[in-house]
Image (cartoon, grey):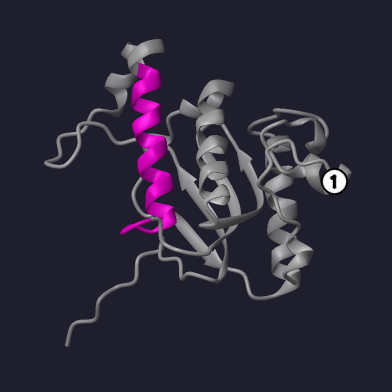
Amino acid sequence: MYFKKTRKSFIAIGDIYFYTATIHNWNRLLHEDAVKRIVTDSLYFLWEKKKIKVYAFVIMPNHIHLIWQLLDKNGKETSQGSFAKFTAHSFQQYLRTNNPQLLSSFAVEAHNKKHEFWQRDPVAFQLTRRETALQKLDYIHNNPLAERWQLCINPVDYYFSSARFYETGVDDFGFLTHIMDEF
């Protein structure tokens, strides 16, 4: 008997997840602020349409971490799928205009696309306990401080993160919800 394997990226509507998506081949596509804004703009769009809630995030040079909740599909596709598709198309447009040489490093031979920006099967881990949610929140906010990255000295100083929101209550991105509203 064969069982269909559930993908790591499966996210049920209504549940809260810690989610990690990585740029294809760990390429540092997300090091420029303009490219990071593509990610935050997509999150804002889906939040504004009441398709997602975002509790925490960080955008690193080659991956993102989120704590989020999918509230509804975006048309026929999941909000997660819409996020990946929109950002991929926007990355492609951005690179065509600003860095065509880098665009070639994302080229793939596939029947349905010419470029791949996100690695397949991002990791989604359901959060059901307050302690786990707080641990993942700390992990997200401290990621820019990791020895490998050293992007800032204090998590609050790294702009493309929800750390400032949790420290000051100021939501620079307009889409954040405090995790303790749910746990």
Q: Quadrant of the N terminus?
A: bottom left
Q: Nearer the viewer, residue 85 or 31?
A: 85
Residue 101 position by quadrant = top left
Residue 178 sits above or below residue 161 on the image:
below
Residue 66 sits above or below residue 147 on the image:
below
Task: Pick out the residue farthest to the front.
Answer: 49
Task: Pick out the residue farthest to the bottom.
Answer: 1
Asked whether, in this view, residue 46 is left or right of residue 113, the answer is right
Which span of residues is magenta-colored?
75-95
Q: Residues within 10 Å of mark 1 (few under 14, many from 20)?
A: few
**Residue 115 on the magenta segment:** no
Q: Quadrant of the C terminus?
A: bottom right
Q: Nearer the viewer, residue 37 or 75?
A: 75
Could you tell me which residue is drawn at 40 percent across and 56 percent down? 74
Q: For the image shown, how many numbered marks are present on the structure?
A: 1
Q: Main secondary structure of the magenta part?
A: helix
Say whether residue 99 is visible: no
Q: Position of residue 145 (x, y in %)?
A: 73, 36
Could you tell me which residue is drawn at 39 percent across and 48 percent down? 82
Q: Position of residue 11 (x, y in %)?
A: 45, 66
Q: Nearer the viewer, residue 29 or 75?
A: 75
Amino acid at dot 1? Gly
Residue underneath mark 1: 169
Q: Position of residue 134 (x, y in %)?
A: 75, 62
Q: Nearer the viewer, residue 133 or 81?
A: 81
Residue 14 position by quadrant = bottom right
